[in-house]
Each structure stands twice: as C-alpha cells, then as structure tokens.
Image (cartoon, grey):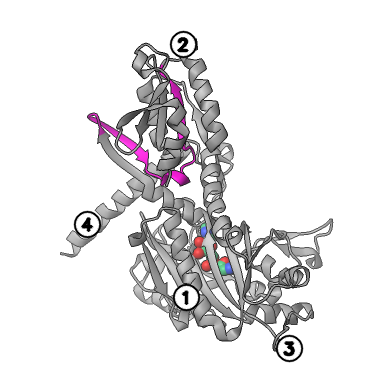
Amino acid sequence: MLEENAQKKMQVKNHVNEKMEAIVALAKRRGFIYQGSEIYGGLAGTWDYGPFGVALKNNITNMWWKMFVDDREDMYGIDAAILMNPRAWVASGHVGGFADPLVEDLKTKKRYRADHLLEEAEIDTKGMTLVQMNDAIQKLGIRSPDKNPLGEVRQFNMMFATNIGATEHDASEIYLRPETAGGMFVNYKNILDSFHPKLPFGLAQIGKAFRNEIAPRDFIFRVRELEQMEIEYFIRPTDWEVQFEQWRTQIWRFIEAIGLDKEKVHELEIAVADRAHYSKRTIDLEYDFPFGRKELYGLAYRGDFDLKSHQDGSKVNLEYFDEETKEKFLPHVIEPSFGLGRTMLAILSEAYTEDEMAGEKRVYLKFKPRMAPVIVAVFPLLKNKPELVAKAREVYVVLKGEFGRVMFDDNGNVGKRYRRQDEIGTPWCVTIDFDTLGENTELLDTVTVRNRDNGTQVRIAISDLKNHIKSVIK
Ligand code: GAP
C-alpha cells in the first residue's frame, strides 16, 4: 500500500514537472521569460522578461493601478527609491529579523530551507520554532537531497547588503529594499503634508524588491529579484474590521478581473502563532499552482506597528491630526500585498492548454482577451503578393491605432502563424485573402477573423472590424 502511494505521488510529481517544464519552455520559445544572464550560465533566482512577458506584466500592473489608484479617490500612487536610509530597515525590524531557517549539508556545504526539507517529508512546519525544526530534522533523520547529514538550523537574513559611496566600512552599508512597503511608510508624512487627505486613505506602489532567498525555485514563483504591488491603507483604529473586509473584497475583484479561476484561489487564515506579533489578522490568498497550493497574495492588519516604529526610529512625529475631533493619533494600517511574478505565473499556468485541432496536437495560452499580450494578429494570406501585403498593412495600421497590442505576421504559412499566435495566446487572427481584394465581389473588403479557442472563423467587413473586436474583448 505504502509503495502504491509512493508510486502515485511520483506520477503526480512527474506530471506536474512536465507541465511546469512545458510552461517554462513555451515562455522562453515565445519571448515571455528568459533565464537571467543565460549566456553566462544564468544567475539563480533571476529571470528576464521578453517582449510578451513585459506586455503581460504591463497588462497586470495597468489593471491593478486602474482598480486601486485611478478609479478611487482615496489612493495616492508613489514610486520611492529602492535604496533607503538603512535606519528605516532597522526600525521596520528587517535588519533584526527578516530571516528564513537555513540548514547546511555537512558534506557539500550546500544550503537549504529547513522548512522546505521538512515539508517535503510531509511535516507541517507552521508555527515551528528553530529548535523544534532542529529536533524534527534530527529525530526523523532527515538528510539533504544529496543524502548527507545536515547541520544545525539557523536564521539567515534575506536582505541584500551593499555599500553606498566610495567607502566600504560598516557605516556605508545599505540594503536593497526587501519589500516596497518601506518606501510608503517613509512617504506617509509627505502625502499628509502635500495633500491633507482625510482618513481612510492609502498609498500604493509597484516596484522591485530583493530577497536573498536560500532556495529560489519553481520558475518565477520564488525569486531573488521580485516585483510587488502593495498598498498601505491608513485607517482609524476602530475601523479595522470593516476596512479589512473591504480590502478582502477588493482582492477578490482583482482576481476576477485578471481572469483567474476563483475555484483555484483559497483563503488561508494565518494562525496566531504564525502571524507577526503586531498583526491582529492576516489572510494569505493561495493559488493552486501546478506544483501545489502556495501563497499568491497577503492581506494583513498591521495595527500602528509601522508608523510607531518609524516615528521612534526617525524621531519625526507621524501623528495624524483629526480636524473634527481635534485628536492626534497614529493611524492603523491594512496592507494588501500582491506579487507581480506570482500573478503572472498563476495566469500562465491557468492559460496553458493542450488540445487537438484538426487532428493535430496543439498548445495555446487561453488568456482572458484583455490580458493577452497581443489582442489581434493580422496576416496577408500570402507573403509574396504585394497587393495582399499592402491591404493587410492597411488593416494592421487601423487596428494598431485602436488597440496598440496588434501584431503583423507574414512568416511561414497561415497554419504556422495560427500555431504561433495560439502559443502567444492571441485571441483573434485576421487574414486578408483574395476575396478581400474582390476576387469574389460579394466579399470585397471583408476579412476572416479566427477565434483562438475553437479555431472557428467568421467573415467580417473591414469597416466593422474595430467594433467587432471591441465587442468581444472581455
Ligand atoms: N509587505 C508585506 C510583504 O512583503 P510578503 O508576504 O513577504 O509580505 C508579499 O510578500 C508578496 O510578495 C507575496 O504574497 C508574494 O506574492 C510576493 N513574494 C514574496 N517573496 C517573493 C519571492 N521570493 N519571489 C516572488 N514573489 C515573492
């Protein structure tokens, strides 16, 4: 029985690996995501985004910014520096405690996340202290993936340190920010002073963060250079439950807007023992990635921990003055935090589809049309007929002017172009053929529009094309 279970598990694992390998290969083949510094053998935990990867990322960030900044009256967008005064990271607690449990293979000296090794042995590490992890590893005789004994579990600070200026002594040591949140807390007072917002109000920021992950893995899921989309929403302390619920609903609205299947997203209420000491409530939103259910986003009620710490650290008064009650107090904070790479990976793994069309196997990315890097591709039926190419360019220019994300493709035969566009996830392909030019007079100035998901084609007048595509973009 045990063997049977182990075999089943292995089969599931192989299937998962195959799906992830197929996604990674497609992402590279079609210009979404490349290994970082690939020609030098790569750099673990870094990935470079190609043209379609950038387009997909922009679609995600544009949607996020529209929903959480542009469409609201209570949000202030900022873009703070990545390099910050290191005192900010002392105050936030990152210098002292932004760490993961590290364990070393005593023979190879390779380092691993102790909690990951325990989880692979099906031990639930939630709430475990370092000592408990150590005990579990020793008691269960857990070894490294190379089958060697492991050393003591210890804390490993994940911040990347560097030196500012020309000196290399301690006083010049600074950090690459490990989260975008810090930049918002240090700008809270600037926003108060420039805009005099009334509570509740929030700061929003999209940007890079850096974490020296012990074990980067699962493609762009756990990386060392990441992008976050974060909000620090300042509230009256008594409002926290209402505001927490409000943001919970907003996160679900975003999940729906980018086209993720809600059934694949799950809320995980973080237990008291696993929450940061200052948090009264934290929910993780987990997604069913091909390699398992893992954290996608977080929503935390952080009390006044951050403003209090930065007030103490900077010695600058960060209190809010309530004009009506004439009260001064430190607002509390609700923090919805979104990983951009994880959003992208969730979208890619959900869109990745294999099926059969006209008796042939095909792969396509079933993006929600408005998230697709290319909304429509335009082809001349044949590349070597100038009159077809000229008409196709005319149609392309009109559509490009309207939708922007439009591609002209005349490479290879039409079948090959469809397969290529399917892999890019382009919802519609428009072909200009001889009927468009009037070979069949009834079809003069009409084109075929082919649907990515089922391969069906409809004939549409060029003059109706823009409106037709507008009406089907969801
Ligand atoms: N300001 C709160 C904060 O940074 P976090 O849970 O450490 O909280 C927030 O990170 C989000 O950032 C996560 O939910 C995840 O989407 C993303 N994230 C965190 N570490 C990551 C990593 N190493 N690689 C990719 N994304 C990461």
Q: Residues under labels 4 and 1: Cα distance?
A: 40 Å
Dot 1, crowdedness within 10 Å: few (<14), some or many (≥20)? few
Above or below, 96 against 238 in this view is above
Q: Identify the image quadrant of the N terminus.
A: bottom left
Foreground residue among 360 and 469:
469
User: Which structural element holds mark 3?
Assistant: loop
Pick out the residue farthest to the right.
Answer: 166
Dot 2, crowdedness within 10 Å: few (<14), some or many (≥20)? few
Residue 363 is situated, as x and y percent measured from the top left of the image, at 34, 37
Q: Are marks 3 and 1 in contact (CB under 8 Å)?
A: no
Mark sitting earlier along the chain (3/1): 1
Q: Residues under labels 2 and 3: Cα distance?
A: 77 Å
Name the residue rendered at 59%, 42% in the picture.
Answer: 37
Q: Is residue 239 visible?
A: yes
The range drawn in magenta is: 357-381
Of discs 4 and 3, which sits in the foreground?
3
Dot 4, crowdedness within 10 Å: few (<14), some or many (≥20)? few
Q: Residues under labels 3 and 1: Cα distance?
A: 28 Å
Mark sitting earlier along the chain (1/2): 1
Residue 221 is situated, as x and y percent measured from the top left of the image, at 47, 55
Q: Is residue 333 magenta?
A: no
Q: Are marks 4 and 3 in contact (CB under 8 Å)?
A: no
Mark sitting earlier along the chain (4/1): 4
For disc 1, the marked residue is 245
